[in-house]
Structure formats: structure tokens, C-alpha cells
Amino acid sequence: MKTRLIVAGAVLAITAGFAGCGEREQVIVYKQGKYQGKPDTKPWENDPGASLYTSSKWNKGDQASWEAALRARNQNQTEYSRVQ
Amino acid sequence: MARMKFLCDAERCIECNGCVTACKNENEVPWGVNRRRVVTINDGVVGAEKSISVACMHCSDAPCMAVCPVDCFYRTDEGVVLHDKDLCIGCGYCFYACPFGAPQFPQAGAFGLRGKMDKCTFCAGGPEKDLSKEEFAKYGSNRLAQGKLPACAEMCSTKALLGGDGDVIADIYRQRVLKRGKGSEVWGWGTAYGKPDQKPAAQAGAKS
């Protein structure tokens, strides 16, 4: 019984070892003029509270509210709105 | 829809390099790589000296995208030009194509071997999970995903460097020019955001 267990263990170890020798496809087949990298997520898909010190508020997944929040923040770059 | 742009007001820039420092700090950019820099023309000439903060302008018809042999560039919905460092082979074509000298190449070994290209991301990170450690390590901070604008523009002490929705910053700039009555030239906008669909007028005698 003990020998069988040892043999089974050895077979498993050898199989797992050989599995590492398998080759994965590493070459990207390029299509001219087409981005084939990783997809990127949209900034408005994040939760406004996902990061520290986030002052802007928008509804998660709502592009219009995210853009409105950025436009409001943009107004900090004009001093005329503060001075007058 | 917002179309992100940079605008540098040469009348206001005082060459303090605050934008350069803010960018370096925010994105933890390594030595030898400058995503943003300040260029001064007519240095020392009284009345003629002008400084401009320069980085990737995220062009409408980006030449870096056109020349990249591995097509590692993409444009986000907000008009920000980003790239995938996993695909970049560091060939340097984008550096030669860019009119602003934006692409930077860290040294990656002996004999001046070029590493993967690094450039301004408009503080929008890159193609990794938003606000993740991997994204920060490869591309730097993702302030847009936090509802913030690029650190360089927000840190600018004289507000010479404006960054954000193109319509909004153009309005701010227009208001400024009307108040001061001069300095309406916007450096780099024609090159970066000129309309590519408008073909130049044919010259007489020129070959087609």
C-alpha cells in the first residue's frame, strides 16, 4: 500500500514537472494598424471612493456625471471666477 | 464628450519647473526620464524671453500611433493617447515622429540599450487594472480615475499650464486674453489638434 502511494506520488510529481515543459504561444500575430494590447477600463467605471483624497463626486459608470465633475474641477484653473 | 488637451500660456509661464517636479513626484518617474520639461526661448533677452511647458500633447492625429511597428498605442474615449508597455519593443520610431519630443526611453542595460518607451499619460494610467500597483509601476498615477486632472496643471502656480476638457480650457484662455489684451498665440495647438481631414491647398506646379 505504501509502495503504491509512493509510486502514485512520484507519477504525479513527474507529470506536474513535465507540464512545465509545455510551450505557450508567445508570439502576437500583428494586424496592421490595430491595437492588440490589453483593454483599458474607463475612468468613470471606478467608484469615486476607490482612492484616498478623492474630492470629485460622480455616479459609478455614468460618463456624463464624471465629465461634469472634471469640468467643475477645471474651473479651479481660472482665477477670474474667484477674484470677481 | 470631453476631449482632454493641454494648453500652455507662454505669457504666464515663469520657468519655475513646478510642473516638471509635480509630474516626477506624482508618477515616480525614474532618473533620466522626463515626461514633462520646460523649454525657454530667447533666454536672457529682455522682453523676448518666453517659456513653455512641453509634454505629450495627446494629438488628435498622433504620429507616434502611425509609425509604431507593433501598434502598441491606443486612444481613450477622452482623447488621451496611451500605450501598452507589454507590447512596446523600444524601437524609438515614436521619438523620431513626435513633434514635441515626448517619448522617453529609460536605459535598460549596457551600451545605451533602450528600455520600453515612457511618456506623459495625462495622469490616466494605462492598460492595467485602474488604481492597481501594476498600473502605477508601469504607467504612473491614474488621476482621471480619481476624478482629478493632471498633477502638472493642477500644481501650476501661475496657472500657465492648463489641462482638461479642451472646450473648458479654451474658454479660460479666451477670457484671459480678452482681459490682458495680448498673447493669444497658443503654442503647439495647430500641430497637435489641427484638423487632419483638412488637406492643404494645392500649390500651382506642385506634383500631386
Image (cartoon, coloured by chain):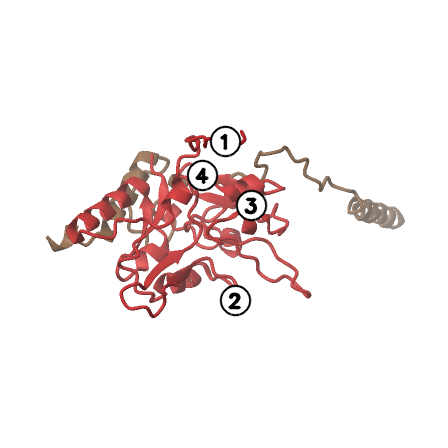
Going 27% across and 62% down the picture, which residue do you hit?
B157
Mark-to-mark CA distance, 1 and 3: 44 Å
Q: In this rendering, is residue A24 above or below B22?
A: above
Q: Seen in the image, is B80 located left or right of residue B118?
A: left
Amino acid residing under circle 1: Gly
Q: Nearer the viewer, residue B105 or B40?
A: B40
Distance between the Cα atoms at labels 2 and 4? 28 Å
What colour denotes chain A?
brown
Say whether mark 4 and mark 2 are on the same chain.
Answer: yes
Whether residue A46 is visible here, answered yes or no, is no
Label 3, on which residue? B84
Q: Are marks 1 and 3 on the same chain?
A: yes
Residue at the left extreme, as displayed: A84
Q: State the separation of the CA atoms marked 3 and 4.
A: 12 Å
Q: Is residue B110 above or below residue A35?
A: below
Circle 4 residue: B76
User: Which residue is at 29% across, 54% downward?
Assistant: B9
Marks 3,2: beta carbons within 8 A: no
Protein chain holding label 4: B
Q: Quadrant of the N terminus of chain B?
A: top left
The residue indicated by pointer 2 is: B31
Separation of residues labelled 2 and 1 (CA atoms): 51 Å
Q: Position of residue B84 (x, y in %)?
A: 56, 45
Observer-side mark, 1 or 3, equals 1
